[in-house]
Amino acid sequence: MSSEAHTSAEYIKHHLQNLTYGHLQDGTWGIAHTPEEAKAMGFWALNLDTLFMSLLLGVVLMFVFRRAATSINTGAPNGLRNFCEWAVEFIDTSVRGSFSAKNDMVAPLALTIFFWVFAMNLMDLLPIDYVPLLMHELNVPFFKVVPSTDPNATFGMAIGVFLLVLYYSVKMKGVGGFVGELTLQPFGKWGMPVNLLLEGVNLIAKPISLALRLFGNMYAGEMIFILIALMGGTWAGMTLGSTTLYGSQIVLSLGWAIFHILIVTLQAFIFMTLTVVYMDMAHQEHH
Amino acid sequence: MNINATLLAQTIMFALFVWFCMKFVWPPIMAALEQRKKQIAEGLANAEKAKLDLELAAKRSTEILREAKEKISEIVNNGEKRASEIIEAAKIQAKVEGDRIIAGAKAEIDQEVFRAKEQLRTQVSAIALAGASKILGREIDAKTHNDLLDKLVSEI
């Protein structure tokens, strides 16, 4: 609990607010100290916590993998190298399973997505108050430690994937082929507007479903962690009710955290697999 | 929870990470894995070959062993034959030598006997002469009676 004075609503709001940097209403640039201030900044603002955490995790991951890649040899692997080799083989097998065309980019893309998303999701398992409390001590008003609970992060990645899908669709099928795919099926050339509507929705649904699925799952998971954390927050001395709530918080947060290990991995895997499937669809002429 | 420029930054970051991974992470690890796969396959093939070689060597070694045994028994046989031959030859030689020695000894004995006889004869003739002269009371002229004596001697 960040402070005794907080009400439950304030506590939840506080935990769901990103550390936003942007154009303040008084005309200066700076960090928003209330959710309202952050909202007023409009589009040209940056969520520093999301950026920092995702950059940190990404850099650490890439560093680890790069170290394994440079020290790799054909002898018996050990420790870190063993893990990285397992990771690469796992991704390679998954990609081979659902991607039939030839593109050297897809497997590294899948590797990056899986481990980056996994690492970002994993931050959810950090005790929910530790980082905000630490940041509070450092005079940082907000800090959301799980980047994948920020739609900016998930949509950022989904848009990246979407651009790749568009690029490869056009590259593999040509502009005509791609446009044809959007307009000439399923009802033939006389149903063009309907076709465009159906296929357009189909196309746009890809990045949106990618981003919202990850965001929704992680956001909901985070929310439940916050709610569980609130149980013990009503501590009012050694009464029966308080003690029961406190005990329940410990049991529930443990249970939810264990369950969340599954969700964290599963969401990363789903994001990766769907990306690979979308890339595969971009490479294939389906007629 | 506002959509803002973080979106763009995240997209760029994502692209950079993918690029880095594609450029510097994936190829070396994949190459090493392929290489190792090949090495393992080679190792297995070599093992298979070594096993075959071993079988062949085992077969050959039993062959050699068998040949050696045959040779040994042959050599032993030859040795035995040769030994018996040598013994036979030695026996024959010994017999010949023995015969020769016996023959020599016999000749010597004959000679001794002859010599003893001669000596005996001369002595007998002398004794006879002495006896006869005693009987006759006078000396027998050896010259006159030489023929007689000789006849006597040869008769003894």
Image (spheres, coloured by chain):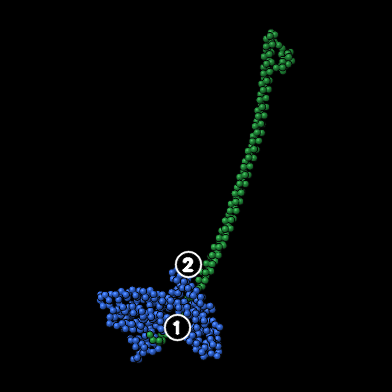
Chain colours: A blue, B green
Q: Residues within 10 Å of mark 1 (few under 14, many from 20)?
A: some
In three-dimensional space, the C-alpha distance between marks 1 and 2, rounded to whole angstroms, equals: 42 Å
Mark in the foreground, 1 or 2: 1
Q: Is residue A276 visible?
A: yes
Q: Which of marks 2 and 1 precedes in the sequence?
A: 2
In the rendered image, residue A4, in percent from the top left (x then y), is placed at 27, 80
Position in image of residue A137 (x %, y %): 31, 80
In the picture, residue A10 is in which quadrant? bottom left
Q: Residue at x 67, y 14 (%)?
A: B127
What mark, if any, has residue B39 been given in the picture?
Answer: none
Judge whether residue A60 can be spotted in this image.
no
> Viewer-proximal residue, B103 or B48?
B48
The extreme top residue here reads B137
SS class of the residue under badge 2? loop
The label on residue A209 is 1
Circle 1: element type: helix
Residue, x 35% and y 84% (percent of image)? A17
Left or right of residue B5: residue A5 = left
- Image quarter where the C terminus of chain B lies is top right
Q: Residues within 10 Å of mark 2 (few under 14, many from 20)?
A: few
Residue for point 50% across, 74% down = A93
Q: Chain of mark 1?
A: A
Tag 2: residue type? Ala
At label 1, the amino acid type is: Ser
Name the residue tied to disc 2.
A76
The quadrant in which residue A44 appears is: bottom left
- The image quadrant that residue A50 belongs to is bottom left
Locate residue A90, reporting x and y percent.
Answer: 47, 73
Which residue is more in the foreground, A286 or A172?
A286
* Image coords of residue A57 (percent x, y): 41, 78
- Discs 1, 2: same chain: yes
